[in-house]
Image: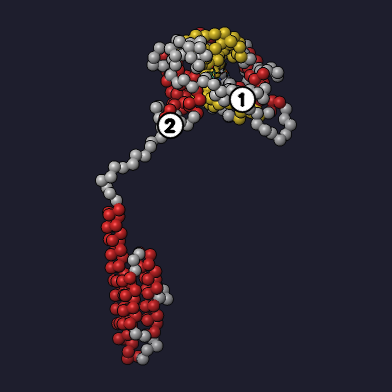
Amino acid sequence: MDIEKIEKKALSELEKLDSLDEVKKFEKKYLGNGGKVSEVFKSISKAPEKKRADLGKKANSLKNRLGKGIERKQKELRESAKKEMKRSFDVTLPGKETGLGHIHPLTSVLRSLCNIFEGMGFSVVRGPDIENSWYNFDALNFPKEHPARDMQDTLFIKQEEDLPSEERLLMRTHTSPVQIRYMEKNQPPVKIVVPGRVYRNETTDASHEINFYQLEGLMVDREISVANFKAVITSLIDKFFTGDVDVRLRPSFFPFTEPSFEVDMSCTVCNQEGCSVCSQTGWIEVLGAGMVHPNVLKNSGLNPKNWQGFAFGMGIDRMAMIKYGIEDVRLFYSGDLRFLNQF
Ligand code: FA5
């Protein structure tokens, strides 16, 4: 075997390589197990005895020279890659700004309302978005024929089986079912707020969406009255709104409260001059409320002779609209960054 010839051929091959991957392959071909150099070593044993020492020296020097040649080539290729990088990067060019995400205005309103209630001793609890008719309607004292149960108002889930009406699944139309779920498992005194998304099958306009957010409130103890409700809501309004917002209470009706009322706040979009958000009235309805109906306490396993309380359901979107003077609730869900980036 002509070792010098092998070396000459190998070094000229190495010289032509122009990537680190190729150098790796070259190294395997010559210096790897079963490679050309190991063939040279194997051939020594077959040579005449007096030539073996000389061949051994030559084979070792071939191995060393190829090893050094490979190292030199790798260094050379790495340096030229670095030079190329420097040439193709202009470090003086201005950088591209990556847009930072931020909290959605509804999330931030919801969080700050929860914080205020927590400061007043309320706990924050949650319930499922998919409910059954028992928790959403029956347990809340809705009569069987109440129009809210209609397919036109409620989004029912398609189900294979023919289930009893209380077990029919639906997208919750309000956060009130969590009142029952909580009282079933927890004895009074109860002092909770429940943030969450609710769903309704209705026509949208400037102040109505088909899904929106509510914050349910429930306080049950031995002696709770409307005065406690008014104190809690007045304190919330003072803490949440920075500017002046007027509030009024109107008598209303909900099957799960008696007496019931609604709370309106002055329209900040038009300064009470009349606009599409307040339906030209100057007032925006923000929450429904009342004293918990005795049947609701019974359905939750509590004796209405021992316990009483107030409950309310606040429209988070409407609170956000009043706080920021937003003229259309649908903007919150539009995904329009020109709108969202203002917050
Ligand atoms: C209810 O949902 C009752 N569960 C509230 C309640 C709870 C009453 C506990 C008594 C005791 P109502 O449908 O009025 O009530 O909705 C409550 C609030 O949600 C409204 O005052 C309004 O602020 C908001 N809201 C109602 N419908 C929409 C809608 N389509 N889009 C945006 N906000 C809405």
Q: Residue at x 33, y 78 (%)?
A: 9
Q: In the drawing, does residue 331 fall left or right of residue 45?
A: right
Q: Which mark is residue 337?
A: 2
Residue 120 x, y percent position in the rendering:
45, 18
Quarter location, residue 148 = top right
Residue 255 x, y percent position in the rendering:
63, 15
Identify the image quadrant of the N terminus. bottom left
Q: Nearer the viewer, residue 299 or 236?
A: 236
Quarter location, residue 338 = top left
Residue 316 x, y percent position in the rendering:
49, 21
Secondary structure category for the residue under label 2:
helix
Mark 2 residue's CB less than 8 Å from ligand 1: no
Residue 67 x, y percent position in the rendering:
31, 72
Under mark 1, the amino acid is Asn
Q: In the drawing, does residue 11 fall left or right of residue 105?
A: left
Q: Nearer the viewer, residue 152 or 156?
A: 152
| Mark 1 burial class by Cα count in 10 Å: few <14, some 14-19, many 20+ | some
According to the image, label 1 marks what residue?
201
Identify the image quadrant of the C terminus. top left
| Mark 2 burial class by Cα count in 10 Å: few <14, some 14-19, many 20+ | few
Under mark 2, the amino acid is Leu
Quarter location, residue 68 = bottom left
Q: Nearer the viewer, residue 309 or 234?
A: 234
Ligand 1 shown in quarter: top right
Q: Residue at x 61, y 12 (%)?
A: 253
Q: Residue at x 31, y 79 (%)?
A: 8
* Gap in angstroms between the C-alphas marked 2 and 1: 27 Å
